[in-house]
Amino acid sequence: MLFHMPSRLYFGSGEIKNLKLIIDDYLKARNPVLVTDAGIMKSGLLEKILPQLPGIKVFDQIEANPKSDTINTIAKEMRALTPDLIIGLGGGSPLDAGKALALLCTNEGDIEAYEGREKYKQDPLPFLAIPTTCGTGSEVTWVSVITDVNRKFKMSIKGPKMYPAVSIVDPDLIQTLPPSIIASTGLDALTHAVEAYLSKPATLITDNHAVKAVQLILGALEGAYTDIKNNPTDRENLMFGSTIAGFAFGNSDVTAVHCISESIGALYDIPHGIANSIFLPHVLTYNLPDCYRKMATLARLSGIKDTNDMTASQSFIEMIMDLSKRLHIPQFKDLNIGKDKFDKIAEMSFENNSTPSNPRALEKKDYLRILENAKHT
């Protein structure tokens, strides 16, 4: 049984105030650069960062579902600056982009050459992750997911040297998030925890993190959605749940939910949290015959009293579907993806390297069935 989590984690309200101290005294970096997106630039969050790092070069071109051509273009400019630290500020997209850029700053060529596991020849630069949503988990994982624009395929670029050197998880950074983002990223974090627990590579250690994450997220999500600014306990529990869900899936794996959501995200630029939120209950329904006993544990820890494992698990799935409705998560049919596109989505989903981790065996035809069921729900 292996559990690997080398990132140094600073967690708590107000931790962002220690950014300069962490950079100077622990990381000993003298020429950092910052990677973020246009939304962060407009949000006011940079006011907590820039006064601590006067003159820092900011790259704010990262889009949702970061694209390979964007990464390659930034890397050429970034290499000329010879930075010694990459800082990622934002949701999963800036954090994944930051990891990819940390790799390209020490390795030649384009990011497409590094798809897969440990393809880099030189260790990436140190990376400092600062999440500003409650769903990424990327602040404690070794994976960067980048969309190859030529193949319209989400690549996983991974390796043990790609873990952030440091992560600063400050719940205060999410207190201005709109409810829709809290809903989708919060359910994204729940997806990470549930998939980690049910995946084939799960271990006793990842299970403990996943179970705690499910309890924290379900207990905090609606309160945060209703009034994030005035619910500091829910903010903290949501961020803590998201982070330890990252501990879990980063050391086990995700399942078919991510296989589908990554395919749809690559093809149609659907936000990752939305896609995961939509497909979590549908994949759980498909997986039910092979993992209902384990799913029943999550059901009972979530307050479901039913002593029958199968019906308790069914109630757990229904609870997630009801929660999604209360949080106004769209349905699959709302994405306006035609049935003629299902074959391509199913093919790409089947080719995803997390398909073997799904608790129930999947073929392309099974992905098609999941898509059909989701379309008519």
Image (spheres, rainbow, N blue to C red):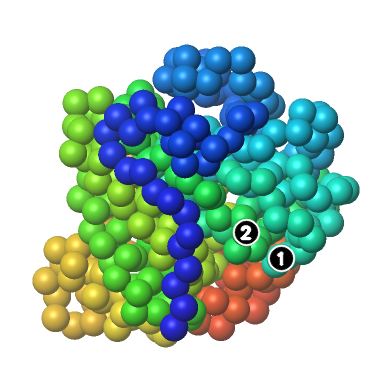
Residue that appears at 34% across and 79% down: 204
Residue 61 appears at what percent x and percent y? 69, 27
Query: In this rendering, is residue 237 above or below 245?
Result: above
Tag 2 near tag 1, CB within 8 Å? yes
In the picture, residue 354 is in which quadrant?
Answer: bottom right
Residue 335 in view (yes/no): no
Residue that appears at 55% across and 15% down: 54
Q: In the rendered image, which quarter contains the N terminus?
A: bottom left
Residue 286 appears at what percent x and percent y? 46, 74
Residue at which label 2 appears: 161
Q: CA gap, disc 2 to disc 1?
A: 8 Å
Residue 118's tag is 1
Could you tell me the amino acid type at mark 1? Answer: Glu
Mark in front: 2 vs 1: 2
Which residue is more in the foreground, 329 or 117? Answer: 117
Residue that appears at 28% across and 66% down: 211
Which residue is more in the foreground, 15 or 139? Answer: 15
Which residue is more in the foreground, 329 or 295? Answer: 295
Could you tell me the amino acid type at mark 2? Answer: Lys
Position of residue 334 in the picture relative to residue 84 (left or right) = left
Residue 117 in view (yes/no): yes
Query: In this rendering, is residue 42 above or below 336?
Result: above
What kind of element bears circle 1? loop
Circle 2 residues within 10 Å: few <14, some 14–19, many ≥20: many
Residue that appears at 62% across and 38% down: 85
Position of residue 340 in the picture relative to residue 127 (left or right) = right
